[in-house]
Image (tube, helix red, strand yellow):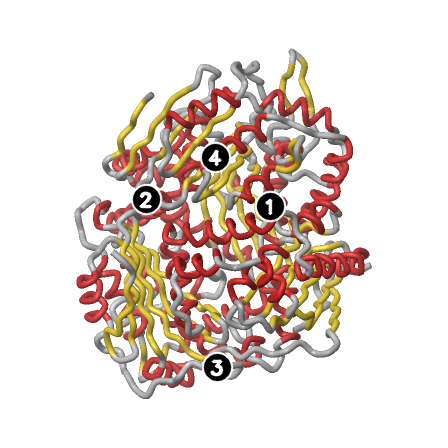
Amino acid sequence: MEKLSYPRLGETVLRHTLPNGLPVMVVPKKGFARQYALFATRYGGMDLRFELDGKLQDTPAGIAHFLEHKMFDTQEGNALQELAQNGAEPNAFTSNAITVYYFDSTDHFYDNLKILLSFVSIPYFTEESVAKEQGIIGQEIGMIEDNPDWQVYRQLMEALYEKSPARVSVAGSVESISRITAQTLYDCHKAFYTPSNMCLVLVGDVDMDRVLNLAQEILPAQSGEEIPRDYGEEESLTPCRTLAESTMEVSMPTFLSGFKCAPVPEGPDRLRRQIVGSLACDALMGESSPLYARLYSQGLVNGSFASSFDVLPGVSYAYAGGDSKDPQAVTQAILSEARRLVSEGLDEDYYQRICRANFGTALKALNSFEAVAVSMAEGCFEGFDPYGFPEIYDSITQQDLLDFIAENICESRMALSVIRPKEEATCTQ
Amino acid sequence: MHETRTEIMPNVYLTYLPAGKFKTGLLSAQLLTPLRRETASANALLPAVLHRGTMRCPDMEQLSAAMDRLYGAQVDYTVRKKGETQCIGFTASFIDDAFVPGGERLLEPAAELLGELLLDPVTRGGRFLSEYVESEKSNLIDAIRAVRNDKREWADLRLLQEMCADEPYGVRRLGDEESARKLHNRSLYQHSQKLMESSRLELFYCGSAGEQRVRDALLEAFSTLPRGVATELEMPRTYAAPSQPRFVTEQMDVTQGKLAMGFRCASRDVPAMILVNLLFGGSSNSKLFLNVREKLSLCYYASSQYARSKGILTVSSGIETRDYDRALEEILRQLKAVQDGDWEDWELPGARNTILSSLRAMPDSQRAMENWYLGQTATGQEETPEELALALQAVTPERICAAAQTVQLDTVYFLKGKE
């Protein structure tokens, strides 16, 4: 067992890899009543095409998310129910790159962990239960399709990318999920829910030895083959379309502008690239930037405006958006501010402030057990140490930010997605 | 160490919640005022305007700079509805002294900044700056309208507006668009002066600093708070359901319909009612979720909430428009099951464990603690999470049925999609 200390964060992390290939991490937290367990697989909404037994397989959009829903079914009934009876709060989510199952409890922790490890590792599907889930997820898809934030994001991804599975919604469509059968679910479970493709993270006052014993008792003794995935050829950095617009029942226009960035390779440098990207977005258009203050006082953006840098398998992009009366004007202002910063540089006092604030935000996130556990899982899958951030902040310079802005925040990389209100309101208060 | 609540100035209370396990300290300053149709929008607008600038940091850039220098101290303005009280103010979260790279102390400057935001806003000729008031007014109106974007929230809100049309509880947290439109910089300034001197101020701190240090920092920061004749807060009144429930249907261009239902609960047995709600629809293991959603696939979500200070139980669900009758019938059938004591052996311990676990975990979140104690004081209650946990452990199945039998349907609101 490996013990890593992070004195600047007041944290330690225990790590051990089981003989079956499963990495297990404990982040001890003293004085908390809660204990948190997260069991994750490196399998998400973008993993649609992969090689199994030497053959390329194409699977329906939304399958990882569908599988997540169905994993809670057990031969005896439903694992959600079992966990909830112990007062645990279980849940799961599927992102572009990973699927995560977790619970939070203040009692019966090891019983709950046993349930978690069992239901995630032992699939149980029938044609009837799959058909029923198609109804439930169909409803979920209907609900997110009514959500303007989701629509504006999906529209942006479709504009930025031509082929990458980043264009595809994690939940899929009513049509794509109708092609899922119990057999496809079993196949995908077998391929991706194998110990070496997963990781287990525990946060709180948790005994590593008890965890390891339980994991060895319940999980398979060996892992399956590693599955090569295909995210498509690397795309050019020019967006597929520069503008995508549609209308919905919203009270004012909402928009996202996206800037296509080069893919970020896995490995220790990945966290640094993420931090540089997010600092650059903060310096350019974050809440304390001169640009934000100007747009806000002109009434062009409101408190919903946000910006950041996202890294997904095989792609990355910076984005900014929110509600605005004039999305085009906001976007032009971002582009011209980027040009100004690149030519004039950043005021050193301003740069230091942005770094302090961004560091403070990263430190605050350690209060959240879920944020800690998810970052541990991502670090484990993508080969970086999420607690290495204080040293990264020390090493970043203002030039790193300017280089990022000069390279990425320009018209040739940009696509704009806008949702406008329908002309006539059908319901007034 | 235990939490304490003391009056540190006339009608100013400090709730001190000691905890050394967080990376951050949390400070909160909240003015408590009765929720009224006439003043709700003005009260909601005020913290947004105050958040635009103080005499020392007169614009957003300088204010942000001050927060950035405190290692990204996050100061948010809040407008909350607790029972029939509107709570407005600021919360500040800042990293704990132990983790500040330069060894600076952040509690004192954070307290000072909170005090400044509330008491020393940037003004010109005895008024707020009209550009700030106008821009925040337009944001407020946008926010009031934006509730329509989230159809679930919209349906739940429309239900309460219909059901509690003549009660303060039917007033929206942010007030209404019409009264927001009438606000301007002079009247808002006058309103703010009255509000400051007549409202109770509740201060909260959760973090590692000692009580004396916190008290000193806050006394210093709020020393210029004007204190006049205090406005008494009224406790929420409860009402009976009408003899026949009311049905309201509206239409929007949406794919999924939203069904919201409101019930009145005459029972004063709050711990029993909390369990009624959990058995019925308050968790992912309750009857609405397991039967209406999972077993019958009648909806994507179906859950219930219990507003204990007001004795109101509400159901929120998303359904296909064509399933309206079946969903309504099935939801009522699940309530009947709770009233009849018709539940399996695991259901009651499951419900009880859910709430006990969340009460035990509450001290693990600074924001949850602040929100709990604010809610308690705003609705005239003193119970700690531990005391409520003890009361819940003593509830019998008989008490649950008795409480559930007082639950009566008041109003049904249906937002249907176009057919």
The answer, for residue A66, to whether it is visible in the render is: no
Q: Callout 1 environment at 10 Å: few (<14), some (14 to 19), or many (20+)?
A: few
| Residue at screen point 62% across, 74% down | B161
Position of A403 with respect to B254 (left or right) is left
Q: Chain of mark 2?
A: A
Dot label at residue B346: 1
**Tag 1 secondary structure:** loop
| Residue at screen point 41% across, 47% down | A338
Q: Callout 3 environment at 10 Å: few (<14), some (14 to 19), or many (20+)?
A: some
Cα distance, mark 3 to mark 4?
A: 46 Å
Residue B141 quadrant: bottom right
Q: Are marks 3 and 2 in contact (CB under 8 Å)?
A: no
Q: Position of residue B265 (x, y in %)?
A: 61, 70
**Tag 2 secondary structure:** helix
Q: Position of residue A102 (x, y in %)?
A: 50, 38
Q: Position of residue B27 (x, y in %)?
A: 31, 61
Residue B315 quadrant: bottom right
Q: Looking at the picture, tell me which residue is in the foreground, B14 or B124.
A: B14
Q: Which residue has dot 2 on it?
A: A363
**Tag 4 secondary structure:** strand
Q: Which residue has dot 3 on it?
A: B39
| Residue at screen point 67% across, 22% down | A187
Q: Chain of mark 3?
A: B
Cα distance, mark 3 to mark 2?
A: 39 Å
What is the quadrant of the C terminus of chain B in the image? bottom right
Q: Callout 2 environment at 10 Å: few (<14), some (14 to 19), or many (20+)?
A: many
Q: Amino acid at mark 3?
A: Thr
